[in-house]
Image (spheres, grey):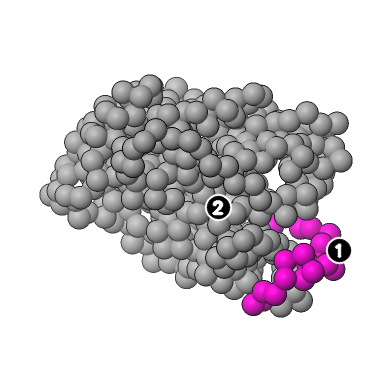
């Protein structure tokens, strides 16, 4: 793993302190069915609902949560809407990555002063439970970052939402928090967006991977990982690289209609139990050749888990100087081959599984070949 240290101005102040990911909002064709899917397949718990019954006239949203991971599934109630146009262009996908801050006005002022394009000026919403202040800026493609200040609010989610307590509440799957979110951008755009996160949001570059690190016989890509000051928010950014055939990034850009969130990595304390649970509930994972495990012990050294346990589940392992990690990737969860999830367990490792890149991308290529898009 290659770690790059950036030379920064002599200041230690983090001008955009982030407490973590507040929520991820997906625009979807049918919010109710999507909420049911995330409950049933991934074990998310019902939290809140907004729509006609709560005084919202243009959309319906369901909020589900597991650990600190909060998803908002939103659908339009009318045709020719901004939400509907997003779905027409992208299919189901991530619209908002909301970041929890202590001061949404300060976050807005600082990022806009540094060149961010305005999405939402600081806006205060309130109900009987207090008030929330939100502001927002544009990121790559149609992706938004919304800053959420909720220090003075004790409601179920946001004003305009009411508790959602259906009888159907399946058990969780052991997912704890968002580890990182990966964005795909177009040709030669990665450095532009790396500069955006560095200059506008104060992130630092952790890792850089080029087409020599992330390539197979047929395809390649490049990636840089950006992290905020306290390390609670990490955004790897991918762009295509030249190869013999169409890369997964090119396929994503074609089907998504431009840049966007490619996958959401969620952490667990027991990946074996989590994967067994998810698999039993119908979640489909990418598979790697059985030969991947033949020399795994030699490549990564001693780990707590038995290779014989990881092998039938298709769980990958990698090590860095801090420890090791275990990871696995779902197949796309939407009709278009775009958004998917990563399940990750860190045993000290701070890296992103560089040793698994070749096996992972060959697995993706096999899926591309089946789709006829390689």
Q: Name the residue under label 2.
A: 265
Residue nearest the observer in this picture, 335 or 137? 137
Residue at 36% from the left image edge and 36% from the top image edge: 10
Judge whether residue 252 is colored magenta: no
Residue nearest the observer in this picture, 77 or 176? 176
Camera sees residue 171: yes
Residue 56, image x, y percentages: 28, 37
**Start-end of magenta stretch:** 284-305
Is residue 61 shown left or right of residue 28?
left
Residue 278, image x, y percentages: 60, 65
Q: Mark 1 points at which residue?
A: 291
Residue at 16% from the left image edge and 49% from the top image edge: 152
Residue 362, image x, y percentages: 80, 48
Residue 142, image x, y percentages: 49, 28
| Sequence-wise first label, 2 or 1 | 2
Residue nearest the observer in this picture, 273 or 317? 317
The crowd level at tag 1 (other Cα within 10 Å; few <14, some 14-19, many 20+) is few
Residue 97: name its quadrant: top left
């Amino acid at each position: 793993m290659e770690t790059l240290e950036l030379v920064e101005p002599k200041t230690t102040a983090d001008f955009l302190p982030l407490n973590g990911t507040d929520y991820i909002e997906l625009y979807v064709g049918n919010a109710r069915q999507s909420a049911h899917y995330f409950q049933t397949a991934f074990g998310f718990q019902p939290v809140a609902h907004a729509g006609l019954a709560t005084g919202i006239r243009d959309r319906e949203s369901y909020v589900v949560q597991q650990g600190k991971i909060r998803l908002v599934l939103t659908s339009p109630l009318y045709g020719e809407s901004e939400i509907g146009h997003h779905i027409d262009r992208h299919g189901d996908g991530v619209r908002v990555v909301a970041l929890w801050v202590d001061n949404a006005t300060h976050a807005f002022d600082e990022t806009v002063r540094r060149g961010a394009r305005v999405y939402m000026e600081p806006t205060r919403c309130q109900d009987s439970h207090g008030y929330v202040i939100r502001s927002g800026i544009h990121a790559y493609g149609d992706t938004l970052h919304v800053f959420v200040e909720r220090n003075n609010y004790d409601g179920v989610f946001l004003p305009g939402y009411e508790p959602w307590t259906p009888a159907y509440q399946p058990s969780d799957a052991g997912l704890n928090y968002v580890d990182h979110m990966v964005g795909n951008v177009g040709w030669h755009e990665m450095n532009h967006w790396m500069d955006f996160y560095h200059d506008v949001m104060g992130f630092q570059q952790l890792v850089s991977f080029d087409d020599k690190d992330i390539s197979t016989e047929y395809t390649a890509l490049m990636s840089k990982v950006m992290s905020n000051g306290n390390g609670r928010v990490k955004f790897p950014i991918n762009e295509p690289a030249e190869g013999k055939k169409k890369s997964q990034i090119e396929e994503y850009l074609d089907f998504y209609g431009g840049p966007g969130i490619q996958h959401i990595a969620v952490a667990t304390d027991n990946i074996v139990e989590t994967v067994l649970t998810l698999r039993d509930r119908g979640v489909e994972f990418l598979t790697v050749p059985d030969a991947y495990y033949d020399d795994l012990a030699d490549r990564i050294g001693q780990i707590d888990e038995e290779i014989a346990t990881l092998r039938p589940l298709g769980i990958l392992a990698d090590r860095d100087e801090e420890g090791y990690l275990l990871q696995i990737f779902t197949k796309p969860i939407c009709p278009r081959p775009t958004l998917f999830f990563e399940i990750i367990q860190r045993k000290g490792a701070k890296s992103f599984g560089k040793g698994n890149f070749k096996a992972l991308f060959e697995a993706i290529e096999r899926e591309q070949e089946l789709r006829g898009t390689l």
